Structure formats: structure tokens, C-alpha cells
Image (cartoon, rainbow, N blue to C red):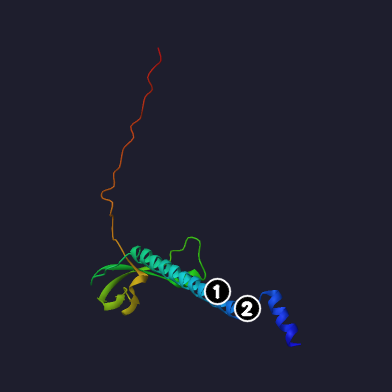
Amino acid sequence: MEHRALWAIKTLNFDLASAGEKRLLELHELEELRMNAYDCASVYKARTKEWHDKHINKKEFHEGDKVLLYNSRLKLFPGKLKSRWSGPFEVKKVFPHGAVEVCGKDLESFKVNGQRLKIYYEGDTLGKVLSLELKEFTSIPST
């Protein structure tokens, strides 16, 4: 029986030492592929974060500014022409890390995340309204 097993190993050219080395090389290759994939993913994540951070608009509010507040509850029941911005509110205090205390006309003051606010510009920001008078145009007689 032992002779037949030895004969089968020789005919299949099955060397246990070389098979073990081959398996070890395959494991190292697999580990290298995994590390390359991890490096690519981390580079992609870093570039995406850099792009995202570059496109964030920093908002600065000062006491006395007029602001509009984004009403996120209107997303649930949207009106076609309904504005999602309510206000204007007046900024009472600006806290670190983006929190802002605002108050309305008949409301007491409350704290809001600064990302839900935008500056409210009162009045006509484009300048004076230009009005033109149209004079009656008489046609030129044809000759």
C-alpha cells in the first residue's frame, strides 16, 4: 500500500515542499493585492475629502445681521411654489462651532445650526428702478 502511494506521488509529480512554497507565494501575492487595493481606496478617500472641503462655502454671521432659516420640514410635504425659507430673523449671538442664536419679530430667541441659515438682503440690492416712457412712433410715408 505504501509503495502504491509513493508511486502515485511520483507519477503526479507532487512534491510537498514545492507545493507548500507555491501556496506561500500565492498567499503573499494575495496580501500584496489587498494592500494595493487598500492604498488605492485611501488615496481615493483623501482626494474626495479634499474636493468636498474645497467646495464648502464658509458662512460668517455677525450680531445684528438679518438671516433666513431653512425649514426642512417642508421637504416632507412640499408645496410647488412654497418657499422653504422662513424669516427674516435677527442674529443675537454667534457661538463657536457654527451655532447661532436668532430671534424673530414676535418670537423669543432660539439656537440654530448656522448651516441652516443664509444672509437676508433687505430692500433693493440692484439699484434704482429705471423707467422708460415709450413715445408714439409715426410711420414714415412711403414715396
The location of residue 20, given as percent across then percent down, is: 58, 79
Give the number of callouts: 2
Q: Which residue is mark 2?
A: 15
Q: Quadrant of residue 115?
A: bottom left
2 or 1: mark nearer the eye: 2
Tell me: residue 130, above or below residue 33. above
What residue is shown at x 27% (from left), y 73% (from top)?
Answer: 91
Q: Can you say which quadrant of the picture contains the N terminus?
A: bottom right
The location of residue 16, given as percent across then percent down, is: 61, 80
Crowd class of label 2 (few under 14; some 14 to 19; many from 20; radius 10 Å):
few
Q: Quadrant of residue 139?
A: top left
The location of residue 25, given as percent across then percent down, is: 53, 74
Q: Earlier in the sequence, mark 2 or mark 1?
A: 2
Q: Quadrant of residue 27?
A: bottom right
Q: Nearer the viewer, residue 43 or 5?
A: 5
Q: Which residue is mark 1?
A: 26
Circle 2 SS class: loop
